[in-house]
Image (cartoon, coloured by chain):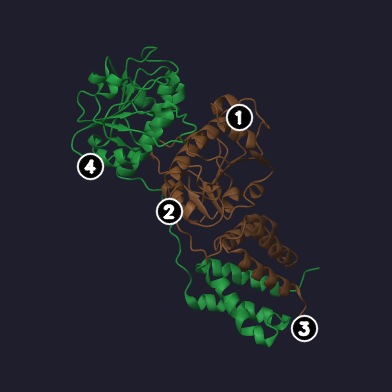
Chain colours: A green, B brown
Amino acid sequence: MSDVSEDTKPVIVLVRPQLGENIGKAARAMLNFGLTEMRLVEPRDGWPNPAAGPAASGADIILERAQVCSSTAEAVADCAHVYATTVRKRGVTKPVLTPEEAAREIPAQPGRSAIIFGPERSGLETEDVALARAIVTVPINPDFGSLNLAQAVILLAYECSKHADLVQPTQEELLPPAPQEELEGLIAHLESLLEPRGYFRPETRREATSRTLRTVLTKPAWNHLEVRTLRGVLSALERQIKP
Amino acid sequence: MSDVSEDTKPVIVLVRPQLGENIGKAARAMLNFGLTEMRLVEPRDGWPNPAAGPAASGADIILERAQVCSSTAEAVADCAHVYATTVRKRGVTKPVLTPEEAAREIPAQPGRSAIIFGPERSGLETEDVALARAIVTVPINPDFGSLNLAQAVILLAYECSKHADLVQPTQEELLPPAPQEELEGLIAHLESLLEPRGYFRPETRREATSRTLRTVLTKPAWNHLEVRTLRGVLSALERQIKP
């Protein structure tokens, strides 16, 4: 993540945020996904705000470095691409992108990008949206749209992180399926236990029954450790019940 | 969104959630993205919880319909696919998916899916994870991973909403994995045969041995016919050898 030029990561601009708590939560959401630059346009309760720190859950560095601006225009002055997040349509004829589409564009184009978010209650004003080249709208349940500021920030930050040099979840090395002969050994072992118990009778059904069993045991693609575990199970089943 | 069969939407299972507020926030996150079925496993402060409603911001219907379960196994009993969300590696060798990958799979496969989330502070226990076929991990900043419960829920719900209306034509001849309770029946049956033969001794190894066995048997995603075949195998193994 640190290899990626800061230019490919968007600046997050909170326009007239009301609650310090929400600013803190937005900072936490940003840092979770590797975004580090926050700008605050006229925060209602001034800045710094004592409610922001606790809500940031350790993302204090974002708050400390947050830049306070006196207008949205000032906050995006050095940005080549401005995206305005809105829930409702604002009667502005601009391209409307999903978070996914915006996140794909941002690192691919030269110059810094900013994503601007409006105040909790009212959202962005028309003049803020006017600064943007495109609108980003989270596709939300039309019957229940209740996305708060920090949630909107986290969804955008999350999408952007997919396209910044990605930190994939680390996958422990999955073992390949066991060689076929190990599987054959397992099947033969099981059949040797079943045979004397009459499982394959009547004889006319033997072939079909055997094939069904093989299909069930082939499906899992067990690795050699798993096959070994099952061999142990079969050996235990062979044992007499201990009194 | 309402046209989509409920079967293509995952059930959200909160395991031992601590704060009612977080249950409410999770409900809000769900409904924002059209998920409606919540199940609660042993909520710490009981249920209903007066702190949940205000935090749901209007998603009360989710809370009203939430089903309370006494175990994770009970909560996922009717689900064919169980995904466990974890942040840290758990030393369990199961496939690890991104939210995106899980969300793409869920509507494409026949049978219900459940996504399980652990308690706020500690996350899922190993035995909860053992019920799952796959792990979902949000790729997060390795230097600052601080995703809370509601944030994890919203990211998964958001990803699922992208794929909800893209119901893939399912290969109808493929049966879905058996519901979890049938798999539990199989595991219990096998364990009842192994127990008197000393398979789980020494006692100090019992838990790990049992978990290993469960992992091996969960991996195949056997359908109900296959589980039935294996129950028949176990019944045969119980029989005395015919002379």
| For residue A223, side relative to residue B191 (left or right) | left
Query: Could you say where residue A136 lies in the image, as x and y percent from the top left?
Result: 33, 33
Q: Which residue is drawn at 38% across and 20% down?
A: A119
Residue under label 2, please give it.
A171
What whole-number distance in Å separates the C-alpha atoms at marks 1 and 2? 33 Å
> In the image, is residue B47 above or below residue B187?
above
Mark 4 — on which chain does it sit? A
Q: What residue type is labelled 3?
A: Lys
Q: How many labels does the image show?
A: 4
Do the numbered discs 3 and 2 sit on residues whose CB atoms are within 8 Å?
no
Residue under label 4, please give it.
A108
Residue under label 1, please give it.
B20
- Quadrant containing the N terminus of chain A is top left
Q: Which residue is drawn at 34% across and 41% down?
A: A100
Residue A59 in view (yes/no): no
> In the image, is residue A161 above or below residue B189?
above
